[in-house]
Amino acid sequence: MRVRPFGPEFEAVLAAATLSISRAGYNTCAALLRARTRAVLAPDPIMSEQTFRARRCADLGLAHVVEGDAPSREMLVAAMRAAIDGPPPRHDFALDGAIESETRIAATLNPAGIPRTA
C-alpha cells in the first residue's frame, strides 16, 4: 500500500494500481475514469458535489463508495473486497471534452476552414 497525494504522476500511479481509495474530487474521478482502475471513493462530506459524484460513479458500476465523516473499518474493508473481486470499470465516455470543444468552436468561427494569418 502506498499513500500518494494528487500530483503530476498521479495518473501513472493510478494506471499501475490494483485499487485506489480516494476522495471524489473532480480531477481524481476524471483520472480514475482515464485509468480504469478499480476504486473505492470516500467523498468528503463537507463537499456536497463529491457525494453526488461518488454515488453517480457507483450507480454506473465504476466505483464503490463509503460515506460518512469517518467510514468504519468494516465498511472500508467490504468496499475494498467488492472492488477487487468485481470487474474493472468499463465505460465508453469521451474524456477529451476540452479538445472536442476547441475543435467545434473553431469550426463554428471558421466554417470554411480558411487558415488564419498571423
Image (tube, rainbow, N blue to C red):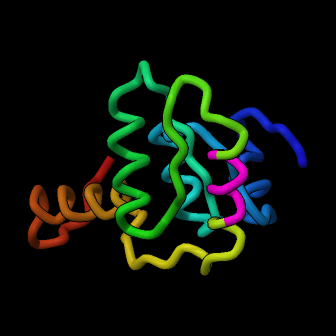
Left or right: 21 in relation to 52: right
Give the percent coordinates (x, y) of residue 4.
Answer: 80, 38
Q: Give the residue furthest to the right.
A: 1
Is residue 3 depicted above or below 62 in this figure?
A: above
Name the residue: 18% across, 71% down.
113
Q: Nearer the viewer, residue 66 or 12?
A: 66
The spot of residue 75 in percent (x, y) is: 62, 46
Residue at (43, 76) in percent of width and height: 91
Range covered by the magenta-colored residues: 75-81
Q: Residue drawn 39% across and 37% down?
A: 51
Q: Position of residue 107 (x, y in %)?
A: 16, 65
Residue 111 placement: quadrant: bottom left
Depth check, front residue: 8 or 50: 50
Q: Quadrant of residue 73?
A: top right
User: Taking 29 as reference, is 89 above or below it?
Assistant: below
Q: Is residue 82 magenta?
A: no
Locate residue 110 relative to residue 58 in the image: left or right.
left
Q: Residue at the location (42% across, 19% down)?
A: 46
